[in-house]
Image (cartoon, rainbow, N blue to C red):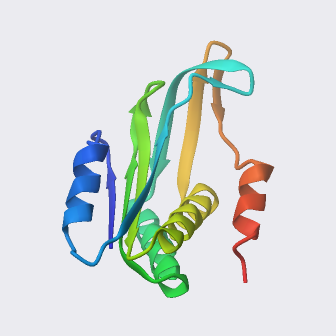
């Protein structure tokens, strides 16, 4: 299990291949790649700036991964989240989960992403033609997270 927070872009294919080949017990590898949209709330997005507090963010993401491991029989997981200023179509996040069977990997990957979206301490600011604004958690994200709560 690994968490990386970085400014640099990542090669999703290379990261997935490394994870896939790390253990011969892996029968499934599920991943999610999030990228910067060009429009949000009807406004064109010029840039998205992601800020964080390093120790707090790494601890939160590791806790999310650990919780997934207690709920599903997964072999490994990887979360890469970028920070800094990004442009539309640039990658923001990679979540990948490996397991012996696809069902465990799909559920764990979705769980990690749902909790990351609402529970990880990232602050996002969009720059639009109308000015800058902070991005709030959406109700749909809260509802997605709520379905996992015990």
- Of 35 and 72, nearer the camera is 72
Q: Position of residue 56 (x, y in %)?
A: 45, 67
Q: Position of 123 compared to 131: left or right?
A: left
Q: Residue at x 44, y 74 (%)?
A: 101
Q: Residue furthest top?
A: 129
Location of residue 54 by image quarter: bottom left
Q: Is residue 19 above or below residue 33?
A: below
Total marks shown come to 0
Location of residue 119 by image quarter: bottom right
Q: Residue at x 56, y 28 (%)?
A: 37
Q: Position of residue 1 (x, y in %)?
A: 33, 73
Q: Position of 99 compared to 145: left or right?
A: left
Q: Residue at x 29, y 39 (%)?
A: 9
- Of 80 and 29, nearer the camera is 29
- Of 142 and 95, nearer the camera is 95
Image quadrant holding the C terminus, namely bottom right
Q: Is residue 147 above or below residue 52?
A: below
Q: Is residue 35 above or below residue 81?
A: above
Q: Residue at x 44, y 42 (%)?
A: 92
Q: Position of residue 41 (x, y in %)?
A: 74, 27
């Amino acid at each position: 299990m690994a968490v990386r927070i970085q400014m640099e872009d990542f090669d999703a294919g290379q990261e997935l291949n490394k994870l896939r080949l790390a253990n011969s017990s892996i029968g499934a590898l599920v991943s999610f790649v999030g990228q910067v949209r060009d429009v949000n709330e009807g406004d064109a997005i010029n840039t998205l700036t992601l800020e964080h507090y390093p120790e707090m963010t790494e601890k939160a993401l590791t806790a999310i991964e650990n919780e997934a491991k207690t709920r599903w029989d997964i072999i490994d997981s990887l979360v890469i989240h970028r920070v800094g200023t990004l442009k539309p179509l640039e990658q923001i996040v990679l979540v990948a989960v490996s397991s012996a069977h696809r069902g465990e990997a799909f559920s764990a990957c979705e769980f990690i992403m749902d909790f990351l979206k609402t529970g990880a301490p990232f602050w996002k600011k969009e720059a639009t033609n109308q000015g800058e604004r902070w991005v709030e958690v959406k109700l749909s994200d809260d509802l997605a997270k709520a379905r996992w709560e015990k």
